Image (cartoon, rainbow, N blue to C red):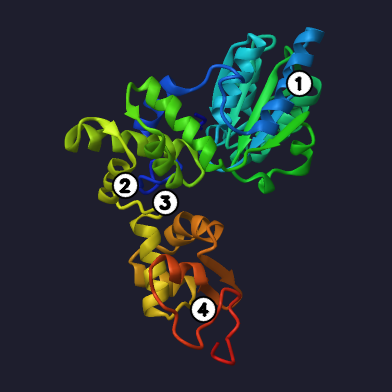
């Protein structure tokens, strides 16, 4: 069970969305693992992080600054809390969008205790003045507070106690190199394999007092898009179905029937995902078609199609982005049970001149 606390009130409500809503946050607080031994998945990251923390404890020093990157719902917030617990230190949690001025960051840094962990979510969205102040704070444990304006302004150095910054980002490419280079340890969180998600589901089911068999857990894991947060959300909805429609015990058939009610298919696609594919295949013959045209056909905003639906469809190999537009792959035709017309474009966007 590994999740992040990132929330976005403007995000569409989707059962397979990776952004945490308030219900997710309440449940995740009870399900989060408390140490690295409990943490499921991310084997390389756990092994490397364990060495970093053990070495820091042996030296009696604060741990190096840590940068965690990866998609929402993979465990960045959970790992930050585990880092604090393993170091026996308190943790302060904030986010990049909440720090709009250098003074906001200075106020937080100046109130840190020695050895405290500062978790900065969505660090790439922090303002540039605050970002530049963070450089010195991370490297020298010092910040310069500017008093006054204009020629009479004075910089007052403020010493900071040693602390550990844990930065989390879903878009590591937006971090400027000077900031990225100041982290002593960087890790990228990968999507989970179905077997790992099955372990997540079994552990969550035990904590939630839900009865589930191996096949039921496998059915939910296969529709969870490689994300523990989604796996736990699907588990809760299947639990509801099992309590109302069955005897409360989750089997493969019960899980499949429950997720069919919520329109989550065997590959984890929901109504929006299938709507995009159906429009692309049925209205435009598999493409290529422009993003704006596709969005109009689906009845959604351009940004919703591009940022919400497309990433998963591309990752699953169902859709390709080409210079000429969006193109369906053979896997998309197969998934929807449709036969591509002769002479249609393939996944690379090139016309099949021989009609094969």
Label 2 vs label 1, nearer the camera? 2
Ranked by sequence position, the earlier of labels 4 and 2 is 2
Residues tagged 4 and 2 counted as in contact (Cβ below 8 A): no
Which residue is labeled 2 in the image? 256
**Of pointers 1 and 4, the one earlier in the residue sequence:** 1
Q: Do the residues labelled 2 and 3 touch (CB within 8 Å)?
A: no
Q: Which of marks 1 and 3 is nearer the N terminus?
A: 1
Residue with the mark numbered 3: 268
Mark 2 secondary-structure assignment: helix
Q: Earlier in the sequence, mark 2 or mark 1?
A: 1
In the rendered structure, are the residues bearing label 1 and label 4 in contact, judged by CB atoms less than 8 Å apart? no
Pair 4/3: label in front = 3
Camera-nearest label, 4 or 2: 2
Q: Which of marks 4 and 3 is nearer the N terminus?
A: 3
Q: Nearer the viewer, mark 2 or mark 3?
A: 2
**Residue identified by numbered label 4:** 288
Q: Are marks 4 and 3 in contact (CB under 8 Å)?
A: no
Quadrant of image for the C terminus? bottom right
Instruction: Count residues near mark 4 (Cα–Cα under 10 Å), then give few for <14, some for 14-19, many for 20+.
Output: many
Q: Can residue 20 be seen in this view?
A: no
User: How busy is the neighbourhood of tag 3: few (under 14 within 10 Å), some, or many (20 plus)?
Assistant: many
Residue 160 location in percent, x, y? 73, 14
Q: Distance between the residues labelled 4 and 3?
A: 24 Å
Q: Which of marks 2 and 3 is nearer the N terminus?
A: 2
- CA gap, disc 1 to disc 3? 36 Å
Q: How crowded is mark 1: few (under 14 residues within 10 Å), some or many (20 or more)?
A: few
Q: Is residue 191 left or right of residue 225?
A: right
**Whole-Å distance between the Cαs marked 2 and 3?**
11 Å
The residue that disc 1 covers is 51
Residue 62 shown left or right of residue 126 in the figure: right
Q: In which quarter of the image is residue 207?
A: top left
Q: For mark 4, give the secondary structure.
A: loop
């Amino acid at each position: 069970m590994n999740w992040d606390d990132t929330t976005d009130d403007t995000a569409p409500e989707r059962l397979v969305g990776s952004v945490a809503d308030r219900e997710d946050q309440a449940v995740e607080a009870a399900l989060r693992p408390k140490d690295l031994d409990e943490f499921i998945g991310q084997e390389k990251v756990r092994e490397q992080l364990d060495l970093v923390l053990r070495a820091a404890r042996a030296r009696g020093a604060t741990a190096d600054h840590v940068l965690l990157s990866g998609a929402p719902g993979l465990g960045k917030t959970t790992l930050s809390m585990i880092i604090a617990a393993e170091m026996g230190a308190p943790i302060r949690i904030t986010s990049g969008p909440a720090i709009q001025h250098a003074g906001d960051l200075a106020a937080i840094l100046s109130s840190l205790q020695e050895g405290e962990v500062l978790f900065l979510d969505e660090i790439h969205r922090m303002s540039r003045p605050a970002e530049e102040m963070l450089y010195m704070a991370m490297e020298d444990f010092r910040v310069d507070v500017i008093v006054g304006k204009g020629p009479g302004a004075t910089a007052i150095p403020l010493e900071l106690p040693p602390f550990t910054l844990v930065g989390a980002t879903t878009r590591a490419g937006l971090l400027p190199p000077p900031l990225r280079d100041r982290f002593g340890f960087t890790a990228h969180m990968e999507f989970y394999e179905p077997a790992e998600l099955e372990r997540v589901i079994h552990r969550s089911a035990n904590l939630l007092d839900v009865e589930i068999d191996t096949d039921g857990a496998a059915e939910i894991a296969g529709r969870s898009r490689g994300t523990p947060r989604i796996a736990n959300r699907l588990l809760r909805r299947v639990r509801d179905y099992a309590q109302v429609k069955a005897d409360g015990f989750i089997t493969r058939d019960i899980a499949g029937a429950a997720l069919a009610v919520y329109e989550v298919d065997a590959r984890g696609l929901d109504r929006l995902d299938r709507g995009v594919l159906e429009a692309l295949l049925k209205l435009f013959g598999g493409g290529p078609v422009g993003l704006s045209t596709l969005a109009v056909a689906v009845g959604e905003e351009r940004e919703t199609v591009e940022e919400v639906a497309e990433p998963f469809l591309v990752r699953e190999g169902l859709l390709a982005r080409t210079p000429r537009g969006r193109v369906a792959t053979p896997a998309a035709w197969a998934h929807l049970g449709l036969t591509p017309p002769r002479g249609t474009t393939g996944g690379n966007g090139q016309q099949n001149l021989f009609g094969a």
